[in-house]
Image: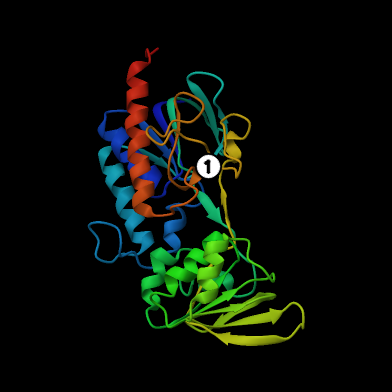
Amino acid sequence: MIETDVLIIGSGPAGYTAGLYTTRAGLNTDLYTGTAVGGQLTYTHAVENFPGFEKISGFDLMDVFKKQIQTLGAKIHHEQIIRLNTQVYPFEFETEMAEKGTARAVILATGAKARWLNVQGEEKFKGNGISVCATCDGFFYRNKTVAVIGGGNTALYEALFLSKVASKVYVINRKDTFSGERLLQEQVQNESKIEILYHTVVQSFEGEAHLTHIQIKNTITQEESRLAVDGVFEAVGTEPETALIVGQVKRTESGYIETNKRTMETSVPGIFACGDVQEEKYRQAIIAAGSGCIAALSAENFVYRQPKK
């Protein structure tokens, strides 16, 4: 039976930062990484916009975070939490290894997973030609040719951002219209560096050591062709990882955990959320880390106000 002060579910910048602060506060901290150790940032092959690091891979940056909190005494478990009961106190949880425990506060840092196309070659080039974050990786495609896949706000934002650094940007949209905001649509349509391919889907990603081409098909004419690109940015949506708290903690209409942005507390006192699982707009490591800090400080305040049994 595990009895801990703070249970952190999920790693990545938010979870690891939360663990840093709760451990330094003298709270027993148990962090469960789940299967996506390090979170979505590990798909980024080079990070140049995180303070203190001129250039570092997403995997190595998360390894630095992990080692730091381990040195301070946080207990890291490489397994998943499969059940969480927020209706009792202390909160109850169970791991995939059937181990049970209680926690005086819980910090949810389960993140949001990118939706993928699941086509041939995609897995091979993830983080090596295929990205899900233009502001993270766009710099590496300066004066190169890239493609953005999607038709919503994220895809349009990504295309406009990339048009400032890349020499050519293709926007691949399976429909004949965009679902994003009208103003963004007009900006994309009026940008000379951007070429829009409507009624188009990607069938495969191709290349040897690096991505060089994508195989595309026009869904109206059924015509297939190869498009030479140096990089692809998939913007077909994200899904917050909230399965553990469905029906227990309030969520937004789009499924993200609803939090008080000043404290990161959820609709259940003592349950906090940070990182992409509650952030619908800004998917940046520094923002996730900041929200992890806030969640940890709030959890510390909550725990020290509770009578210890």
For image coordinates 58% across by 71% down, the residue present is: 122
In the picture shown, does residue 37 fall above or below 298? Answer: below
301 and 237: which one is in front? 237
Residue 52 vs residue 9: left or right? left
Query: Where does the image place residue 134, in percent across and percent down from the top left?
Result: 44, 66
For image coordinates 31% across by 28% down, the residue present is: 27
104 and 242: which one is in front? 242
For image coordinates 37% across by 61% down, the residue present is: 58
For image coordinates 64% across by 75% down, the residue present is: 202
| Quadrant in the picture for the C terminus | top left
Residue assigned mark 1? 80
Query: Where does the image place residue 254, in percent across and percent down from the top left?
Result: 60, 45
In the picture shown, does residue 307 fall above or below 248? Answer: above
Label 1, secondary structure: give it.
Answer: loop
Q: Inspect this view and state whether residue 202 appears.
A: yes
222 and 164: which one is in front? 164
